[in-house]
Amino acid sequence: MAEKTILIIGAGIGGLAAGCYARMNGYRALIFEAHTQPGGVCTSWKRKGYTFDGCIHHLAGCDEGSPLYRIWENLGAFPREIRYPEDLVRVEGADGKSVTLYTEFDRLAEELGRVSPRDRRPIETYLRGVRASTRFELFDVLDSPARGVLAALPRLRHLARSGSLTMGKAAERFQDPFLRQAFATLMYDWPEAPLLTHLNILGGCVARRYGFPAGGSLAFSRSIAERFSNLGGETHYNARVVRILVEDGRAVGVRLADGTEHRGDDVLSNTYAKATVFDLLEGRFLDDKLRAAFSKPTDKATMGLHVQFGLARDLSQEAHALVLFLPEPVEIAGDRRDRLDLELFGFDPSLAPAGKGVLKAVFDTSWSYWRRLAVDRARYVAEKERIAATVLAALERRFPGIETQVEVVDVATPLTTERYTGGAESFAGGSLFGMLLAKPRPLPGLRNVWMIGQWVGGAGLPGCAVMGRNAVRAISRRDGRRF
């Protein structure tokens, strides 16, 4: 059988996965990455001996033998050392009250009972949902939707009640004012997040399906890039694609910024969806549905602002995530904030020099705020410096002396993400079930082009990886090859 070529735009997780599965199924595969390293948004960066992580919070598929583990294993990401923090998150009120969601079930139950004995019934309901989630992985549906749902049926009666509830609505079940306040923030401080998603992550942490890959996100991405290379794949870095070449309604190749062209049988675009449609294809392949989606950009940049500190301070005994309510609100990026959403990386000593630690504050922000500032570079830089100083001052009460322990400061805005990944504002998306199907997106009127990855609805890293795999599966099926 003659070798066919798949051209892949972007070395994010979706593109890397597509490349690996392309090689495993007998295709020649070339990845073109505009940046100097793999991973896309699944990345980390180093400053003065500290590793600042920009992506992974909880990685699904850490349990050996599970469908997701097998996918990570195929991609060369596993086996690897995994860190399992003893908590999911700790919430501390401005008045000193606290609650910790431990990842050991009995300890979790004891902690919730301590915080609010009078909320016994809603706590028991919540704990039943957590226990049910220890035996069912929502993301297993990615591997086989029909089989995954059938396997879940015995436990869905506990989980179905959670499907329509947000964290904020579920919090209203509790009588204790502090527990009600704290509960709404337990899912990455997103009160609007589905309770079902939170239960899946906490249950996964209890069952050790979820963990953190030692060394951080870039090390994880690099292991997949290495697997692709070992399979015989070709990766071209500093290679920005500026056009998808089309002949007779069919993609036939790509043109790079330096003018060189590469021909292939299929093109998979793992870059920003709007750039694919309007830049690489000049807006020629659209239908009403796509036009409507692209007409509604979302100004909110979820977790778009990262303020990180390399500290001469041991954080190994701290919670790995902390929601800290403040005595007085502070202004961050134009918004009044009454709490800080923190990640403390003391659980992974490889991310900082011995005896030191990394602390990150994460904020939702808006693209428009930073775009207005960026018109004046001096104002943009000054605002980043002001925000870092504001966060540090707010942390001083909880971490006495922290302002004198800072060795390096790093502030990444949505424009940082745009500069390094090409991704910008998101657009109207589909349902959670649609995301779990991880279907690559074709374009109307154009053959042999598929859009994959985070920007077209990949459900986190697992969803992006499976979407890349599914694109190659579809191509193999079309070509009559056994996948």
Image (spheres, rainbow, N blue to C red):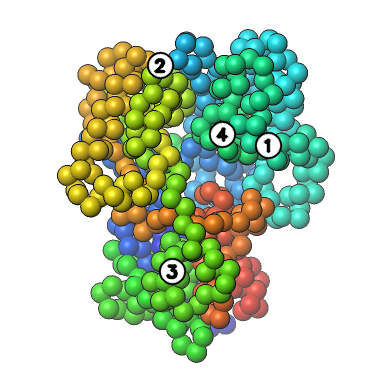
Label whose residue precedes the other's in the sequence (1 or 3): 1
Q: Which residue is mark 2?
A: 327
Residue 476, by quadrant, is: bottom right
Residue 197 quadrant: top right
Q: Residue 239: where, in percent of width, then height?
A: 31, 67
Viewer-nearest of discs 3 and 2: 2
Q: Compare marks 1 and 2 and give the one earlier in the sequence.
A: 1
Place residue 274 in its image quadrant. bottom left
Who comes first in sequence, dot 2 or dot 4? 4
The residue indicated by pointer 3 is: 276
**Marks 3,4: beta carbons within 8 A:** no
Position of the N terminus by quadrant:
bottom right
Give the Cα separation between the discs numbered 2 and 4: 20 Å
Cα–Cα gap, marks 1 and 2: 29 Å
The answer to the question of whether label 1 and label 2 lie on touching residues, with beta carbons closer than 8 A, is no
The Cα–Cα distance between marks 3 and 2, rounded to whole angstroms, is 46 Å
Q: Which residue is mark 1?
A: 165
Q: Nearer the viewer, mark 1 or mark 2?
A: 2
